[in-house]
Image: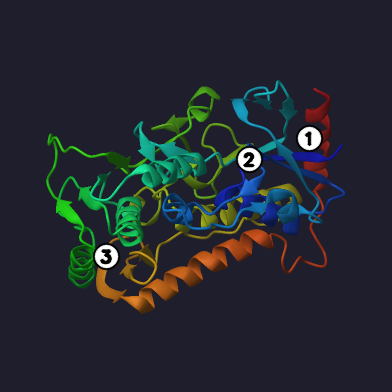
Amino acid sequence: MKHRIVVLGAGYAGAHAAGRLARRLHPADTEITVVNAEPHFVQRVRLHQLATGQHVARRPLREVFAGTGVTLRQARVVAVDAENDTVTCEDGLQIGFDTLVYALGSTAATEGHHIAGVEGALKVRDRLRELTDGATVLVVGGGLTGIEAVTEIAESRPDLDVRIAVRGDFGDWLSDRARTHLHRVAARLGITVHEHTDGSRLAADLTVWATGFQAHPIAAASGVTVTDGRIVVDETMRSVSHPHVYAVGDAGFAAGPGDRPLRMACATGGPMAWQAADAIAARLSGGTVPENTIRYFAQCVSLGRRDGVIQFVTADDRATPKAIIGRPAARIKELVCTGAAWNIAHPTLLLPTRRRRLAPATATVTEQHSRA
């Protein structure tokens, strides 16, 4: 019997995990299945562009995984049973697994218009198209998503009255150099900044919520240990309660440098996926589980299409005084996004000439598990 590895979700984390597992493990021993609700991969870090009517590439997942040995099932997951090792989909399909990689990501933490997913970004796009000269657009939230959304909207629609509301100071986590540039760009684009807005009432023709993300509720009902809806994992992205379950990307709650939780971000999802895939491959093949520490290097922020900030950070994601600003930063951010998309499109690049076979003990357990 082949060892059944099921990956839920084909965003940055899920796609990377599946591709890396296909690179590491021999197809004679393992069966890798990716379950995803949508047929295409769309870069989440470009959803603010999609919301303003720009073309954002959609890559068919069947093309992404063609020839890799990875099986794609287009289905919407509605439940996971970690005790009985099954995944239930909306159409009633049940999928069994021996190892599960949970990568269903997150959604907007607030109801209303948002750009946390493709559907939400398209709704914002359609609403923006309805607005006439002088209409007010308010973006709520001063994190990376809020900043990128408000600058993109202001640049693409200079006829609108564009505003942003933040809880504290605008860009208060950035270095002095980066924060000064952010305020300069906001002024150039005509963005009105409302700071310290807790409890404030602000009227707008369109309000776009960017106040954070929350994990899908499926994990909390699966039987695994969670915190804030995210699966608690160890340094190898393995569930602390169910050792055959791994969680990567926004769905996983892992400690980073200084024991600070890794933040929900593309910059986190990829390394988490690599860590999980390498650990799974090592454990199944009887190898040594690699010890790698996930750390941060920079935060890349686009401020429209021609401006940006590259904020260098410490390992635990705190801003340092060093930052790249302006057009060079915008070019770097574009290279990062393009590179991330290219990596997704080539999931088994540099495929090892000799992939690992399952260790005899693992193969025996898998066979017994599958018959149970």
Q: Secondary structure at mark 3?
A: strand
Q: In this orientation, which residue lies closer to the viewer: 261 or 203?
A: 203
Q: Secondary structure at mark 1?
A: helix
* Residue lying at 43% horizontally and 46% vertically, measured from the top left: 125
Q: Amino acid at mark 1?
A: Val
Q: Is residue 253 visible?
A: no
* Residue lying at 57% horizontally and 55% vertically, measured from the top left: 275
Q: Amino acid at mark 3?
A: Ala
Q: Residue 319 — which label?
A: 3
Q: CA distance from mark 1 to mark 2?
A: 33 Å
Q: CA distance from mark 3 to mark 2?
A: 36 Å
Q: Residue 38 — which label?
A: 2
Identify the residue under disc 1.
365
Query: Callout 1: 10 Å neighbours few (<14), some, many (20+)?
Result: few
* Rendering quarter of residue 303: bottom left
Comparing marks 1 and 3, which lies closer to the viewer? 3
Q: Quadrant of the N terminus?
A: top right
Decide: marks 3, 2 in contact (CB < 8 A)?
no
* Residue lying at 34% horizontally and 57% vertically, measured from the top left: 148
